[in-house]
Amino acid sequence: MTHTNKVLTLKQPSQINQHLIGALHTGALHAIRIPNYCSEFQCATVTAAIELLYDGQTYSGSAANVGTFGLSLYEVSKNPDRIHDYYRLALCEQELLRQYCNGVTLPIDQIRIDLDEAWQHGLKIERFHDHRAPANCGLNRIVLPGGFLGLHVDRTDWDLPDNDRAQAMCTQFGANVYLETAQQGGELELWQFMPATQAEHDALMMPGSDYQLDRKLIGEPDTVITPQRGELIIFNARRGHAVPTVNSKRVTASCFIGYYGDDHALSAYS
Ligand SMILES: O=C(O)CCC(=O)C(=O)O
């Protein structure tokens, strides 16, 4: 276990415990890194499968230079008519990806198993809307050359204001596996900053953007990580984070981990 500033590097996911998750929650820790979480072969196989299945779908709005495979609740919150697509596609898209990987474990399946074993109360797939309908669990992103993700926070509780599960969540962590990294750019920038309210968030938004916060108002990141191929990084997604412009393709597999307190199961969703 190595500790530099507020970034902790672990050898294996079984080292994740309540103390570390609590530290990510409070901001005492900015990120947990697990290098070589996925093998070279796994990264190459899963990247090839994502690229084969990728049909040109990009984020709507001002993150349009980011290709995605797998629908996210964030997208659905912007287009509520897509909620049926979300649940219809949730299991079949992940199953299709598994089939295209031909027996090679998906990084998100690995995260689900590892955190289920590591966390005292286990991890389950999230069910926000209906106890029978599992959430999608796996958002694969292809940041295209010239693409970036501006400074933003992820707030499922704001995206689903009428949903009991979303409102009960203490925080949400981003779990990203880096399948292909950019030659230049594509770092993970992390801020300690977390808007206290949605009104504060909205007042800090960048003019003309539908998701970005204005860096001029928030300042420089507190931590910058250059992700390594195969690495898993977990961070608090309610705090500011961004990915600067890449000069070559950057491919990741991601999900959110919902944290409901130490006496509850973690949940996984996208
Ligand atoms: O790809 C990354 O490094 C971070 C992605 C991101 O912005 C997120 O998970 O919300």
Image: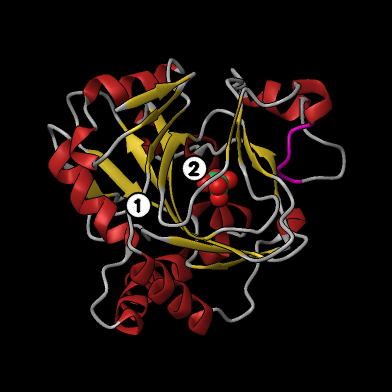
In the image, residue 91 lies at what x, y percent?
32, 70
| Magenta stretch, residue numbers | 210-214
* Colour setting: secondary structure
- Specify whether residue 134 is in view: no
> Which amino acid type is shown beneath numbered disc 1?
Asn
Mark 1 residue element: loop
Q: Is residue 121 left or right of residue 198?
A: left
Q: Residue at x 50, y 84 (%)?
A: 52
The residue to which callout 2 is attached is: 160
Q: For the residues marked 2 and 1, what is the alpha-carbon distance in whole angstroms?
A: 35 Å
Q: Are marks 2 and 1 in contact (CB under 8 Å)?
A: no
Q: Quadrant of residue 130?
A: bottom left
Q: Is residue 111 left or right of residue 169?
A: left
> Which quarter of the image is occupied by the N terminus?
top left
The question of residue 109 being in magenta is answered with: no
The residue to which callout 1 is attached is: 36
Magenta part, dominant SS: loop
Q: Is residue 217 left or right of residue 270?
A: right
